Amino acid sequence: MIKECTKGRSTVTIENIVAEKKCMSCGACSGFCPKSAIRMSYIDEEGLFKPIIDHAHCVECGICLKCCPAIDHWKKDAIIGEYKELLLAHSTNGTVRHWSTSGGVINELVRFLLEKNIVDRVLMAGFDKNSKIETSGYWITKRNDLKNNPRNYASRYVVVPLLEKLQDYDEAEKIAVVGTPCQIRAICNRGGGVSATKIFRIGITCSGGMSYKATEQYKQIQHCQAGRMYYRGDGWPGKNSLQGTDKTVDSNHLGSLFEVMFSSQIFKNPACRECHDHFAEYSDISFCDFWNEEEKRKEKEGNSCVIVRSERAKLILDQMIAAQKIEEVRKLGEKEIIQSQVQVLKIKKGTTHNRIPYKYFMMFIDCVYRHRVYKRFGYRTYMRICMAYGKICSLYKL
């Protein structure tokens, strides 16, 4: 039996975290297990990966529970978290900028870290035609450059058990990880805290992980089940691109069928409702889209909203600007960033998640997902659900 963790009167194990739908599918328990006794298995019914324990090899060390982000959510009072600098920037490489999610600065940062031998390799998610969710974790090295295929590493709107790949990580190595808030938090849990961990942490904002069932349903509606799915890239805000053998379905991201499916909350991992970290507060540097109204009207190629948190990250970013790898557009204010992400922040940092209308809405969402009612939905129904969710969020202040 996996070593238990007592929290109040309840006993916490990996099994009951999964059973209570609190597992964020980050892969940390598998990646950090010293005996490789935990593997991440795809659960088709949920469209998510979950940990499976081999009790014959488990030594009850408790490392899986120590690193699990579901046990301690580390809620902070600050909305953005601690930072050194806030800015808007983009890659100076036109191809990288155009085919990345928003500005291409993460792409440039990863390559800069490798080129300057700051790290030996970088772990990040990317497109994988052989994966059940079309996405896997990759170790990026100098011989495995992402410059030529930036769209393969643009945002993947699925939950990837990325940290499972840390099974072959040697602590003597210098590595970086590009991850969501829960993945970054798990690394800090394992490393003994933010200041203690040696891994360079690149955070990406996350409003909630998405089941692959959304992509499957989208393909069904578009009559293109065998197509490859690219969620962003091709300018900004980018396009959802479903590329089949006999047809391609391209849709501008904002207002598209897939975007309203995402925003409807139907396909979100229920565990993500417990997470209070939107901006990857425990990273060295974190990134997000800048959903500013003027930006949405005028910007066509994309800029990265950059939150610089550590001195090390600030030094690296300054070197990148000096080397003309990236261009700074302007400094940003904290209020600007908050306003550009205000709806999701009302849930994660405000009191909306405790309100009765929100709870009833989530009960409705759970029923729709559990009974697969969404299979009867089209664009208008998803849009109505999005509007209802937005109205609930508008009732309360951050």
Image (spheres, rainbow, N blue to C red):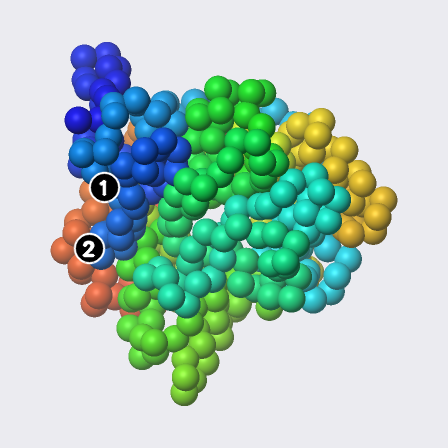
Mark toward the viewer: 1 or 2: 1
Kindly identify which numbered label has been placed on residue 45: 2
Left or right relative to 194: residue 297? right
Kindly identify which numbered label has been placed on residue 61: none
- Residue that sits furthest to the right in the current view: 322
From the image, tell me which residue sits under label 1.
52
Q: Is residue 140 above or below residue 238?
A: above
User: Quick check: can you spot residue 100?
Assistant: no
Name the residue nearer the viewer: 59 or 98: 59
Circle 1 residues within 10 Å: few <14, some 14–19, many ≥20: some
Name the residue nearer the viewer: 350 or 178: 178
- Spatial CA span between label 1 and label 2: 16 Å
Q: In the figure, residue 58 lies in which quadrant?
A: top left
Q: How far across and down, in percent of the image, does residue 396 sit?
A: 41, 33
Q: How far across and down, in percent of the image, does residue 162 sit?
A: 43, 46
Helix, strand or loop under label 1: strand
Q: How far across and down, in percent of the image, does residue 213 sit?
A: 28, 59
Quarter of the image with the N terminus is top left
Q: In the figure, residue 349 lies in which quadrant?
A: top left
- Residue that sits furthest to the bottom in the current view: 246
Report the residue at 39% width, 75% height from top. Answer: 227
| Amino acid type at mark 2 | Glu
Report the residue at 38% width, 46% height from top. Answer: 161
Report the residue at 34% width, 68% height from top. Answer: 218
Helix, strand or loop under label 2: loop
N-term-proximal mark, 1 vs 2: 2
